[in-house]
Image (cartoon, helix red, strand yellow):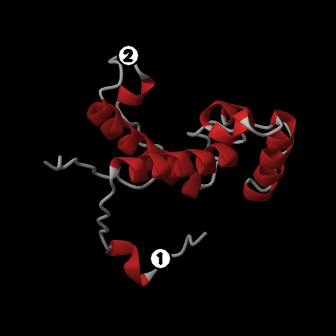
Amino acid sequence: MATEPCPGDNAKYTITLNAAQARAVLSSLELYFRLGMGQVDELNPFWGWRATADPDKVRWALLQLQFAVADGMGYGDYLAVDSAQLPEQFKVACDIFQVLRREVAREEQHHAASVWHHTPLRNSKQPLPKVSTENQP
C-alpha cells in the first residue's frame, strides 16, 4: 500500500451506489479490515456461504488469507482498530465502513439500538468520509 504522497492525494472522489451495491461495499470493507485486525472468527456470521460450505474449511481459508494480508500475525493474534501496530489502510477501511454502515442503517430503518447507528469513530489519520442518500421516486 502506498504511504508516500502521490499526485492524486488531494483529489476528492464521488461514487453513487444503489442499496445492493452499498451492502456489497460494506461486506468487502468489513472482510478487509477484520482480516487486517486478525478477527477471522468475527467474519463467519456475516457471510452467506457459511450455510453451504464446510465451516472448518471456510475458517481455514480465512486464516490463510489473514496470514497473507496481516503480515507477521499468527493464529489467534488480534489487533484493536486503534492499535498503533495496525497498518493505516485497515483503519481507513474501517472508517469508511462505519460511515457507510450508519447511512445504510438510517435508510433501511434498522432498530435504534443497532450498532449500525453508532456514531462513526475516526481511527485513521484521514478525515471521516461524507455520505448522503438521494431517494429515487
| Amino acid on which disc 1 is placed | Pro
Front residue of 108 and 97: 108
- Residue at mark 1: 5
Q: Is residue 12 placed above or below 88 in the rendered structure? A: below
Give the image quarter of residue 12: bottom left
Front residue of 43 and 136: 136
Query: Looking at the image, is mark 2 or mark 1 earlier in the sequence?
Result: 1
User: Does residue 103 appear left or right of residue 124 in this picture?
Assistant: left
User: Does residue 54 appear left or right of residue 31 in this picture?
Assistant: right
* Rendered location of residue 130, percent (x, y): 28, 51
Does residue 91 appear anywhere in the picture? no
* Rendered location of residue 119, percent (x, y): 34, 31
- Residue at mark 2: 113
* Rendered location of residue 51, percent (x, y): 71, 33
* Secondary element at tag 1: loop
- Residue drawn 62% across and 47% down? 31
User: Does residue 27 appear left or right of residue 112 in this picture?
Assistant: right
* Secondary element at tag 2: loop
Q: Residues within 10 Å of mark 2 (few under 14, many from 20)?
A: few
Q: Which disc is residue 121 wearing?
A: none
Does residue 35 appear anywhere in the picture? yes
- Residue drawn 51% across and 52% down? 93
* Rendered location of residue 82, percent (x, y): 56, 39
| Amino acid on which disc 2 is placed | Ala
Q: Is residue 26 placed above or below 119 in the rendered structure? A: below
Distance, label 2 to label 1, CA atoms, is: 40 Å
Front residue of 23 and 94: 23
Q: Residues within 10 Å of mark 1 (few under 14, many from 20)?
A: few
Q: Quadrant of the N terminus?
A: bottom right
Frontmost of labels 2 and 1 is 2
Instruction: Check contact, mark 2 vs mark 1: CB within 8 A.
Output: no
